[in-house]
Amino acid sequence: MRMEFLVLALLVTSASAERPASATAVSPHCGAAEYHQLDYWIGDWDTFETDAPDGASVARARVEPIAQGCAIHELYEQADGLIGDSILSYDPVRKQWQQTWVTNRGSIMVIVGNVRDGALILEGEAHLKDGKSVMQRITWKPHPKGVRESAVLSKDGGKTWVQAFDVLFVKHVDGG
């Protein structure tokens, strides 16, 4: 009996060590609605310029929940070789969202904000590899074809803003 229990315990331990924790498990600490305000963006996406939505995809983005639903990870791979990786998370102490974004071109950005009028709006500094910094404001919102993400930037501390990008995420279709 004792040997059977030991063998069973080893099998169970070995099986659980081989497979990761369930991706669908949600931490009881992150069940509040605020943690899920960006769930509409979770998925596998092709990215298009909004002024040319029928043109070629400019990037592929994979957005998935991590840390048992306590954060969202984005891997963004642009056609020109730019790779961006970010983590978006809701901070219940500050009662705001934060994104930390890093690229393979040496840029880093940390922006914070909240949902307003159905859109997540985050703002902060982007540090460029040349040592310069700019203010950036990024907005995500649901769109009939997927998710729209747009950004404006300011080189004068927020006095004036210019369009940085405006893209539409459309669900990726294999073979298409």
Image (tube, rainbow, N blue to C red):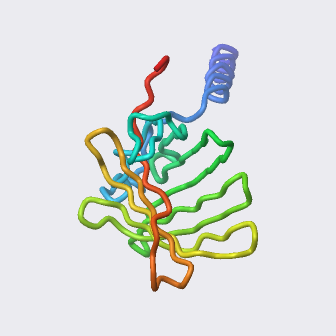
Q: Which residue lies at the image location 68% right of the left edge and 42% below the top edge?
A: 81
User: Toward which corner of the image does residue 114 lie, by quadrant?
Assistant: bottom left
> How many numbered marks are there?
0
Whether residue 106 appears in this view of the structure is yes
Give me the residue at 43% from left, 49% from top: 167
Which residue sits at x=61%, y=50%? Answer: 85
Q: Position of residue 111 (x, y in %)?
A: 51, 69
Residue 153 position (above or below residue 71):
below
In depth, the one of 83 and 101 nearer the eye is 83
| Residue 143 higher or lower than 91, as above or below | above
Q: Position of residue 126 (x, y in %)?
A: 60, 70
Toward the viewer: 100 or 18?
100
Position of the N terminus, as image quadrant, is: top right
Q: x%, y% of residue 68?
A: 48, 45
Q: Name the foreground residue: 94 vs 106.
A: 106
Residue 31 appears anywhere in the view: no
Q: Is residue 55 left or right of residue 58?
A: left
- Residue 120, image x, y percentages: 36, 61
Of 68 and 56, which appears nearest the observer? Answer: 56
